[in-house]
Amino acid sequence: MQRQAEVRHDWTEQEVRALFELPMNDLLFQAQSVHRQHFNPNEVQVSTLLSIKTGSCPEDCKYCPQSAHYNTGLEKQRLMEVEAVLNKAKQAKESGSTRFCMGAAWKHPTERDLPYVIEMVKGVKAMGLETCMTLGMLQESQAQQLAEAGLDYYNHNLDTSPEFYDKIITTRSYEDRLNTLQHVRDSGMKICSGGILGMGETARDRYGLLMQLANLPQQPESVPINMLVKVQGTPLENVEDLDPLEFIRTIAVARIMMPKSHVRLSAGREQMSDELQSMAFFAGANSIFYGECLLTTPNPETNRDLQLFKRLGIRPEQRIEDSDTDQEQKLAAEIQAQQDAELFVDATATH
């Protein structure tokens, strides 16, 4: 039997580069083999993302149309009312989502807005959905309040490598981002953290991003890999396109380095062909954002996703309420049954 892929926190640049430089067939085979050890290969976790407060963000992230530093024609909106958010969550659940993610264009949440955000978390949680938020940097006390309200996941991306970071953002440091992740982890919440590809970074920066994520004391439970959506008016609107196969390589290496994490095929899917998305799923991506809009950029319509799932024989992953131990035991039994079935020879089928 194949040896179980171990979760490591000591990846070196040399090791990561060696994975990226494997022949594509070898890389995909290794990634898919790791994927099958920890996940059902024909299930994809489905999330819906809603912008609960749009535009006027004081950060200067060069990729973001919500930054107040750039004129992108984005219509600014105040924080949505709690009831309106809960209605959107209800629609998301009815369309098959198991996790509802709420994003606000803030440097950090204010004490004035936090009570409304907490009511959103409680309301969405009461519907039986997993909850996720991205609100910018968090203080330790804010992370604790969100955890006590029942927030399951907090999203805070590292975006890129430490070396390339200040070419993209100057209004907060890499250390600020790592500190927020630590506050989230200390509060008991799960972490959703990944990055963006195609911002003009080098291959070495892609190695560095994955090393930062994998070498955290506890790897993120969810790792969104975004393809840059170039928006007119942002400094990156004319950056050179990333080779789609390099994107697939990054998905595959992320799966190998973070074997137990959900790797999310995130922003940029609107520009991806069905064939490219299918290749990403084979490379180990097993989570997507569902619906027509991803914060402020387009996302494939829900029915297109369902049609692709049907063509690929993929189904949405169901939310599991069991403990981690129960989940691991059930998964191990399912994997063993699958391996036994592959070894079993139907004598009646022989000639």
Image (tube, helix red, strand yellow):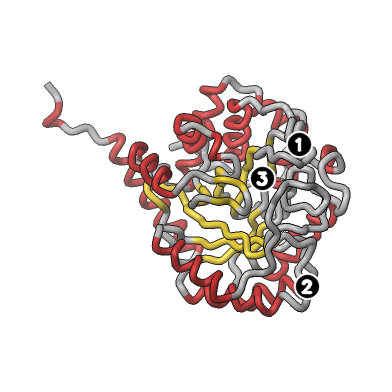
Query: Which mark is first along the chain, 2 or 1?
Result: 2
x, y percentage for residue 165? 82, 42
Rendered view: 335 above or below 329: above
Instruction: Answer few, some or many: residues within 10 Å of disc 2's Cα (few below 14, many 20 plus, some between 14 and 19).
Output: few
Task: Indicate left or right for 189 with 126 as reference.
Answer: right
Where residue 1 sits, quadrant-wise, is: top left
Amino acid residing under circle 3: Arg
Rendered view: 123 above or below 96: below
x, y percentage for residue 237? 73, 35
- Nearer the camera: disc 3 or disc 2: 2
Where residue 42 sits, quadrant-wise, is: top left
The structure residue drawn at horizontal position 72% and vertical position 75%, both measured from the top left corner, is 113
Task: Indicate left or right for 304 with 218 as reference.
Answer: left
* Label placed on residue 8: 3
Amino acid residing under circle 2: Thr
Residue denoted by label 1: 236
Residue 32 visible: no
Query: Which mark is first along the chain, 2 or 3?
Result: 3
The structure residue drawn at horizontal position 36% and vertical position 37%, both measured from the top left corner, is 312
x, y percentage for residue 208? 76, 38
Task: Indicate left or right for 264 with 43 as reference.
Answer: right
Query: Which mark is first along the chain, 1 or 3?
Result: 3
x, y percentage for residue 226? 63, 42
The structure residue drawn at horizontal position 71% and vertical position 75%, both measured from the top left corner, is 114
- The residue tagged with tag 2: helix, strand or loop? loop
Residue denoted by label 2: 110
- C-alpha distance separating marks 1 and 2: 29 Å
